[in-house]
Amino acid sequence: MPLSAVIITFNEERNIGRCLDSLVGVADEIVVVDSFSTDRTEEICRAKGARFVQHPFNGHIEQKNYALTQAGFDHVLSLDADEALSDTLRQSILAAKTDWSADGYAMNRLTNYCGQWIYHSGWYPDRKLRLFDRRLARWGGQNPHDKIEMSAGALQIRLKGDLLHYSYYTIEEHYARARKYADIAARAMYARGRRARWWHLILSPAFKWFRNYVLKTGFLDGRAGWTICRISALETKWKYRALREMGRL
């Protein structure tokens, strides 16, 4: 069964090569949809044989749905540029290609944070549905946190192996992206009619930290776990603060 791998990119020269290399022998075609990168992303993609398409970025969900339309085959593996297949996951996907017995396949995502693999803090197992029949699936959710939504009654199976996620190389990157994602999420919530009250700025961040650090045992990840849970709580606070400010305009 032929399989298309689709990836969206913007200035991903640091990650895209590793992602593409992990797809060799698994995907029958690789399609990269790029939102006009200014670094070496295009050069790397073309050198590794990927089909490179440029398209304006109107949101993570919108871009990923456009990428699905560019796939040459109906069975699709959708990855982010900072992800790669583990050896076990590669074998699982190859087995699924040989005997496609579900409509969609999920997998656990294991995140590398500043050089350390994170097994707690609400980050693992981070189940993601990434292998599917596009005729029965579409990207949904709320930007920037997209997710695949399958048609009613679609059969899903979880594969063995991890999707390796190389998230942040420095803590400063984490802070910067948290602020960016908080703003995107606030605008998406505002567009849907959501509004923030004063208690959201206090209770929601506190619960986020307690859930990830205590209930999700983030303390077992050491200093990295403390940092991850703290910034995740701050992102929640920034999101509701931005949403509250929008409601005052």
Image (tube, rainbow, N blue to C red):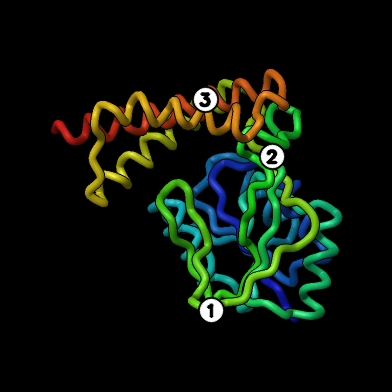
Say which residue appears at 75% left-offset and 63% top-offset.
Answer: 159
**Residue placed most toward the observer, 113 or 60:** 113
Q: CA distance from mark 1 to mark 2?
A: 30 Å
Disc 3 crowd rating (10 Å Cα; few below 14, some 14-19, many 20+) is some
Gap in angstroms between the C-alphas marked 3 and 1: 37 Å
| Residue 142 located left or right of residue 227 | left
Label 2 amino acid?
Thr
Q: Nearer the viewer, mark 3 or mark 1?
A: 1
The one nearer the camera, 99 or 37, is: 99
Compared across the picture, whether 74 is left or right of 205 comes to right
Q: Which mark is residue 153?
A: 1
> In this orientation, does residue 72 appear?
no
**In the structure shown, which secondary structural element does the residue marked by tag 2 occupy?**
strand
- The spot of residue 39 in percent (x, y) is 59, 39
Say which residue label 3 marks. Answer: 231
Percent x, y for residue 232? Answer: 51, 30
Contact check, label 3 and label 2, Cβ < 8 Å: no
Viewport quadrant of the C terminus: top left
Q: Position of residue 208 (x, y in %)?
A: 48, 32
Q: Which residue is mark 2?
A: 111
Q: Position of residue 13 (x, y in %)?
A: 65, 41
For badge 1, the amino acid type reads Gly
